[in-house]
C-alpha cells in the first residue's frame, strides 16, 4: 500500500528564516506533487516533479525530488507571513491517476 | 478561464438521508476525481473517471457511495443512508487526458455535515 509521510506536521517559523519540509513515500511513483491549502479553501497546485533530481522553484519555494530515496523536499527561503498555509505532498499510485496525499504540514510564519 | 466548480458549497443533512454532490470540471478535461478530506487530514482518494466510465473506484469506502458522470462532463457523487462519519469536505478535481504531468485542478469543495 502506498503511504506518504510528511514532517514536520506543524511548523512555526519567524519571518526571514529558512526551513525545509520533508515528504517520504513508500513505493515507486512516477509523479510527486506539492499543493498549498489556505484555511477553508481548496488546494492550489505548486509543483509537479517527474524525474529523479528534478528541482523546481517559484518565488521563495523550491521543491526537489530524489526517487531513489523516495524523498521530496520543499524548501522555504526567507519566509514571509503570506506563506502561512498547509502544504501537502502527494504521489500517484500504481495507476498514475489516484493521488495519495500526506497529512500536510501546517506552516505559520510569525513577524 | 473557469475553474472546477462544486455545488452546494455546504450541505447539512440528517443521519440516514440521501445526498448528492455535484462537480463541474474544467472544460475539456476528460479526467475527473473525487476526494474526501476530513478535518486536519490530507485528501483521500475516492474515485476516478476517464470520460463517462469509472476507471478506478477503489477508494469508495462502501456501497453507500456511488458516483456517475453520464455525459463525460459533470459528475455527481451520491451517498445513501448517510452516517455521521461521512461528515467531511468532498473535493473534486479534473485534469487533461494525455498530459504527462497529470496535474489535477481542485474545486472549492462541498462541506457535508451529517447530524
Image: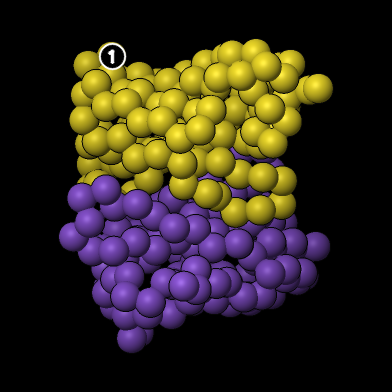
Q: Quadrant of residue B12?
A: bottom right
Q: Is residue B45 visible?
A: yes
Q: Give the vertical position of B31 relative to A97 (above or below).
A: below
Judging depth in this view, the residue of A72 and A55 nearest the camera is A55
Chain displayed in purple: B
Q: Chain of mark 1?
A: A
Identify the residue at image location x=27%, y=68%.
B50
Horizontally, residue B115 falls left or right of residue A75, namely: right
- Secondary structure under the numbered disc 1 in the rendered image: loop
Q: Residue at x 42, y 72 (%)?
A: B26
Report the residue marked by disc 1: A69
- Residue A7: % across, % down: 54, 18
**In front of the other: B10 or A81:** A81
From where the camera sits, is residue B62 visible? no
Residue situated in front as seen by the camera: B2 or B72: B2
Colour pattern = by chain
Q: Give the percent coordinates (x, y) of residue B51.
A: 27, 74
Q: Which chain is yellow?
A: A
- State left or right for residue A33 relative to residue B15: left
Q: At 32% from the left edge and 26% from the top edge, which residue is drawn?
A: A55
- State whether residue B91 is above or below residue B12: above
Image spot of residue B59 (x, y percent):
41, 52
Q: Residues within 10 Å of mark 1 (few under 14, many from 20)?
A: few
Amino acid at each position: 500500500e502506498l503511504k506518504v509521510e510528511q514532517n514536520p506536521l506543524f511548523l512555526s517559523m519567524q519571518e526571514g528564516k529558512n526551513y525545509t519540509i520533508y515528504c517520504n513515500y513508500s513505493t515507486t511513483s512516477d509523479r510527486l506533487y506539492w499543493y498549498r491549502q489556505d484555511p477553508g479553501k481548496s488546494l492550489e497546485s505548486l509543483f509537479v516533479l517527474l524525474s529523479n533530481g528534478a528541482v523546481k522553484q517559484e518565488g521563495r519555494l523550491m521543491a526537489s525530488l530524489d526517487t531513489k530515496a523516495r524523498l521530496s523536499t520543499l524548501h522555504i527561503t526567507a519566509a514571509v507571513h503570506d506563506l502561512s498555509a498547509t502544504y501537502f505532498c502527494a504521489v500517484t499510485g500504481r495507476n498514475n491517476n489516484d493521488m495519495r496525499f500526506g497529512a500536510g504540514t501546517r506552516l505559520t510564519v510569525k513577524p | 478561464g473557469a475553474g472546477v466548480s462544486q455545488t452546494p458549497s455546504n450541505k447539512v443533512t440528517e443521519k440516514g438521508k440521501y445526498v448528492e454532490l455535484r462537480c463541474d470540471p474544467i472544460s475539456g478535461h476528460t479526467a475527473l476525481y473525487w476526494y474526501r478530506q476530513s478535518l486536519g487530514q490530507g485528501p483521500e482518494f475516492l474515485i476516478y473517471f476517464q470520460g463517462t466510465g469509472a476507471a478506478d473506484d477503489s477508494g469508495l469506502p462502501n456501497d453507500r457511495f456511488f458516483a456517475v458522470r453520464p455525459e463525460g462532463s459533470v459528475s455527481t457523487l451520491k451517498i445513501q443512508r448517510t452516517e455521521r462519519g461521512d461528515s467531511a469536505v468532498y473535493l473534486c478535481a479534473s485534469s487533461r487526458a494525455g498530459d504527462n504531468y497529470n496535474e489535477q485542478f481542485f474545486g472549492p469543495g462541498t462541506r457535508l455535515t451529517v447530524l
